[in-house]
Image (cartoon, rainbow, N blue to C red):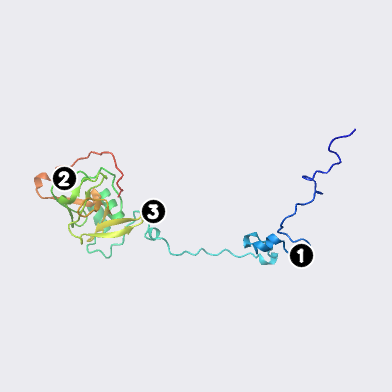
């Protein structure tokens, strides 16, 4: 019986098939590298054959203490909401006095850099005429004429009474860079400043109601225009 294909060599699959002529990377015999290898030049380090290190080179080494380098600013300054150092402030109050005099929310916002809930502050929709002061030391900060409705959820002003009334500090909390505003006299945290305010300054001093106290120009309209309504939030940057 004769089976078709048995005993015949197939050039495509047989190991005895002749190799196609062409440039080779390997050297044939003692003739050195092939023409293609000579044209490409030396191989990169990643493609070279690595030599194994001798076993004597691998030694057990005791664990070393981790080296702590300089930390990023938002870690070096402490966790979010930590109290600032107020030794350089012009007006200094003891923490016991502030806890007795301020409400828990006022203390958390002014002393721990907290933030009140949006649209729930006392002065968010306040429209009475007068002056807004620091709730801690009573320093005048904003005039009611500079207050505007930013629809951000917090009282907003486009200017301050005096450039010396507040202090600007870099704030890197929550993984972003903002400019914090604080009272220049006692260091109380007020809020942040943004560049999306109206003319003529183009600034928006976004302030917590818990950081403010209000002195009305006319005592009869001290609470005029105050409202607890909570309209829908917009894309304004938060405190």
Which residue shows up at 28% across the image and 51% down it? 109
Tell me the residue that label 2 is attached to. 127
Q: Are dots 2 and 1 in contact, CB under 8 Å? A: no
Q: Earlier in the sequence, mark 2 or mark 1?
A: 1
Q: Earlier in the sequence, mark 3 or mark 2?
A: 2
Tell me the residue that label 1 is attached to. 31
Taking depth in this image into account, of 166 and 48 the one nearest to the observer is 48
Q: Earlier in the sequence, mark 3 or mark 1?
A: 1
Which residue shows up at 9% across the image and 45% down it? 220
Estimate how packed mark 2 is, as few (under 14), some (14 to 19) or many (20 or more) residues with alpha carbons within 10 Å: some
Q: Residue furthest right?
A: 1
Q: What secondary structure is found at the residue carrying circle 1?
A: loop
Query: Mark 2 against mark 1, which lies toward the viewer?
Result: 1
In space, the residues marked 3 and 2 are separated at their CA atoms by 34 Å
Q: Residue 228 falls in which quadrant of the image?
A: top left
Q: What secondary structure is found at the residue carrying circle 3?
A: helix
Estimate how packed mark 3 is, as few (under 14), some (14 to 19) or many (20 or more) residues with alpha carbons within 10 Å: few
In space, the residues marked 3 and 1 are separated at their CA atoms by 63 Å
Q: Residue furthest bottom?
A: 56
Taking depth in this image into account, of 201 and 36 the one nearest to the observer is 36
From the top left corner, tell me how far across and down residue 80 is, in percent. 36, 54
User: Is residue 112 visible to us here?
Assistant: yes
Tell me the residue that label 3 is attached to. 175
């Amino acid at each position: 019986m004769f089976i078709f294909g048995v005993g015949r060599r197939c050039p495509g699959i047989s190991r005895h098939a002749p190799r196609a002529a062409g440039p080779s990377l390997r050297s044939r015999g003692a003739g050195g590298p092939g023409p293609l290898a000579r044209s490409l030049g030396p191989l990169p380090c990643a493609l070279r054959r690595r030599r194994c290190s001798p076993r004597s080179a691998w030694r057990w080494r005791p664990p070393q203490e981790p080296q702590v380098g300089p930390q990023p600013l938002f870690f070096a300054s402490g966790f979010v909401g930590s109290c600032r150092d107020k030794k350089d402030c012009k007006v200094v109050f003891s923490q016991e006095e502030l806890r007795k005099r301020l409400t828990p929310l006022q203390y958390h916002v002014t002393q721990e850099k907290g933030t009140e809930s949006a649209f729930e502050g006392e002065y968010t929709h306040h429209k009475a005429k007068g002056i807004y002061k620091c709730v801690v030391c009573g320093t005048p900060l904003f005039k009611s004429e500079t207050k505007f409705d930013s629809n951000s959820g917090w009282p907003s002003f486009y200017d301050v009474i005096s450039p010396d009334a507040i202090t600007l500090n870099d704030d890197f909390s929550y993984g972003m860079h903002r400019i914090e505003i604080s009272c220049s006299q006692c260091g109380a945290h007020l809020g942040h400043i943004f560049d999306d305010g109206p003319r003529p300054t183009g600034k928006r001093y976004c302030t917590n109601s818990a950081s403010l106290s209000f002195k009305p120009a006319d005592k009869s309209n001290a609470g005029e225009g105050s409202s607890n309504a909570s309209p829908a939030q917009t894309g304004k940057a938060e405190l």
